[in-house]
Image (cartoon, helix red, strand yellow):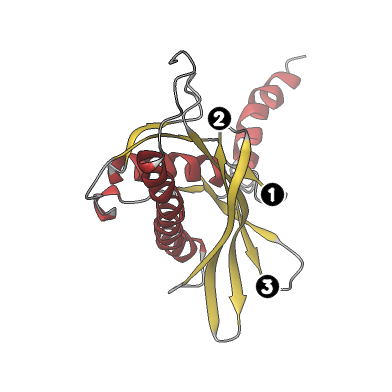
């Protein structure tokens, strides 16, 4: 028994020394995706309408915090040591609410967590957010699908597809994240224009529409 004691005493030290030789996972770098509200132009006039921003839906392959890149389409790969702080669709929804509120164009802008319905709803789909390697470099490619809904009539009044891309200055995840922010800023600006063109016309038509005669008048 006395011969075993020194060997047993050394066992924790040996195991501790071996653990230092085991490979450690690379630390993960986390990136945000958001717009700069200071770059949103303030509308000259408020429309007497309320707009609800529904939670965006992400297409397959872009519904997690993983950062996608594409070298050999249609194959999609993901960065191993970099990710978004949240799924891109979630950050898209937050940016849309921020932008529409900053524009001051609508009487009220409602988020998807609101219990109120609003006069109109904006539904969006994140089709793609990819670091695409193309001939001569790479780009951050962002594709959205939009639908504007009249909640009183329960019908889609217009749809649009928005595609933006920004050159990536460095062929890594950091360059992709920075270019994606610029692509998002542009896409959100185009979304503001899409809604404004339609809803300004509708608000104008509502102001000029004659009132229905009162049936109680004889």
Q: Can residue 112 be seen in this view?
A: yes
Badge 3 crowding class, 10 Å Cα cut-off, few under 14, some 14 to 19, many 20 or more, is few
Looking at the rendering, in which quadrant would you find the C terminus? Answer: top left
> Within the image, what quadrant is residue 72 found in?
bottom right
Badge 1 crowding class, 10 Å Cα cut-off, few under 14, some 14 to 19, many 20 or more, is some
| Residue 121, position as x, y percentages in the image | 52, 37
| Residue 10, position as x, y percentages in the image | 64, 28
Q: Which of marks 2 and 1 is nearer the N terminus?
A: 1
Looking at the rendering, in which quadrant would you find the N terminus? Answer: top right
Which element is circle 3 on?
Answer: loop
| Residue 16, position as x, y percentages in the image | 60, 34
Q: Residue at x 56, y 50 (%)?
A: 26
* Dot in front, 3 or 2: 2
Which residue carries the number 3 mark?
71
Q: Give the tally of numbered discs.
A: 3
Image: 150 above or below 132: above
Q: Is residue 3 visible?
A: no
Kindly indicate whether the residue at mark 1 contacts the one at mark 2 (C-beta within 8 angstroms): no
Q: Earlier in the sequence, mark 3 or mark 2?
A: 3
Q: How far apart are marks 2 and 1 (CA)?
A: 28 Å
Which residue carries the number 1 mark?
59
Which residue carries the number 2 mark?
152
Taking the view exactly as shown, the residue that stands out farthest to the front is: 218
Q: Residue at x 62, y 43 (%)?
A: 156
Q: Distance between the residues labelled 3 and 1?
A: 19 Å
Which element is circle 2 on?
Answer: loop
Q: Which of marks 3 and 1 is nearer the N terminus?
A: 1
Residue 60 shown left or right of residue 207 in the figure: right
* Dot in front, 2 or 1: 2
Q: Which residue is drawn at 67% across and 24% down?
A: 6
Residue 187 shown left or right of residue 56 in the figure: left
């Amino acid at each position: 028994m006395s011969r075993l004691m020194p060997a047993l005493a050394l066992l924790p030290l040996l195991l501790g020394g071996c653990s230092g030789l085991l490979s450690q996972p690379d630390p993960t770098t986390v990136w945000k995706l958001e717009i700069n509200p200071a770059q949103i132009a303030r509308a000259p006039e408020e429309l007497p309408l309320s707009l609800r921003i529904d939670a965006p839906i992400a297409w397959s392959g872009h519904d997690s915090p993983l950062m996608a890149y594409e070298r050999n389409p249609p194959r999609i790969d993901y960065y191993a040591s970099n990710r978004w702080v949240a799924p891109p669709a979630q950050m898209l929804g937050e940016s849309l609410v921020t932008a529409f509120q900053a524009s001051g164009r609508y009487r009220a802008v409602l988020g998807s967590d609101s219990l109120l319905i609003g006069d109109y709803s904006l539904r969006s789909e994140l089709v793609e957010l990819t670091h695409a390697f193309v001939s001569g470099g790479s780009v951050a490619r962002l594709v959205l699908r939009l639908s504007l809904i009249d909640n009183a009539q329960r019908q889609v009044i217009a749809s649009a597809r928005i595609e933006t891309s920004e050159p990536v200055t460095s062929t890594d995840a950091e360059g992709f994240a920075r270019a994606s922010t610029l692509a998002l800023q542009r896409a959100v600006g185009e979304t503001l224009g899409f809604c404004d063109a339609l809803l300004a016309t509708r608000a104008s038509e509502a102001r000029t529409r004659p009132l229905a005669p009162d049936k109680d008048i004889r």
